[in-house]
Amino acid sequence: MLAYKFSKTGHRKFFVAAAGSDPKLKSISSEIASKLRASGLAAQSDISGRSLRKILESQSNTATAVIIVGEKELSLDSVRIKWMSTGEEATVPISEIQKNLSRM
């Protein structure tokens, strides 16, 4: 089940994915997506428990970027951003997600 569905506009769309089944990761993923939406960005998160591989496959032609929330990244107060058009990935502090998303 998706926490939020993308609108059918031409705007950039971001997907926040938990890399694991830990409820804490899912909760933080939902919080990040909510904050992005509150700032005016189209964002959704997955709360169904699909694997990260399945999420990346399903978002390859839909999302501009997937924001990955994993245990390793959270231990550094960071997330990974994967740009779907290029495959480029970057680890960024949670506090700088919006700044990094606005670069493209």
Image: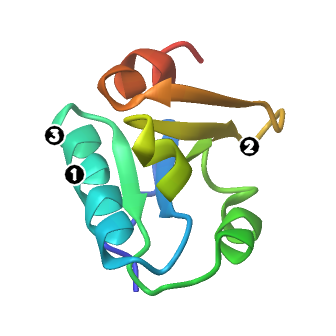
In this rendered view, identify the residue nearer to me: 51 or 61. Answer: 51
Asked if marks 2 and 1 touch (Cβ < 8 Å), the reply is: no
Point 37% across, 20% down: residue: 96
Which three-letter amino acid code belongs to the residue tagged 2? Answer: Met
Q: Is residue 71 left or right of residue 58?
A: left
In this rendered view, identify the residue nearer to me: 45 or 68. Answer: 68
Which three-letter amino acid code belongs to the residue tagged 1? Answer: Ser
Instruction: Please give the residue where the numbered disc 1 appears in the rendered image.
Output: 34
Q: Quadrant of the N terminus?
A: bottom left
Q: Secondary structure at mark 2?
A: loop
Instruction: Please give the residue where the numbered disc 2 appears in the rendered image.
Output: 84
N-terminal label among 2 and 1: 1
In this rendered view, identify the residue nearer to me: 97 or 37. Answer: 97
Give the percent coordinates (x, y) of residue 32.
Answer: 29, 47
Quarter of the image for residue 6 reads bottom left
Q: Is residue 38 left or right of residue 30?
A: left
Point 38% across, 50% down: residue: 43
Q: Residues within 10 Å of mark 2 (few under 14, many from 20)?
A: some
| Residue 78 visible somewhere in the drawing | yes
Asked if marks 3 and 1 touch (Cβ < 8 Å), the reply is: yes
Instruction: Give me the disc on residue 38.
Output: 3
How far apart are the alpha carbons under marks 3 and 1?
A: 6 Å
Q: Secondary structure at mark 1?
A: helix
N-terminal label among 2 and 3: 3
Q: Residue furthest right?
A: 86
Which three-letter amino acid code belongs to the residue tagged 3? Answer: Ala
Q: Residue furthest front?
A: 75
Up/down of 62 relative to 104, above or below? below
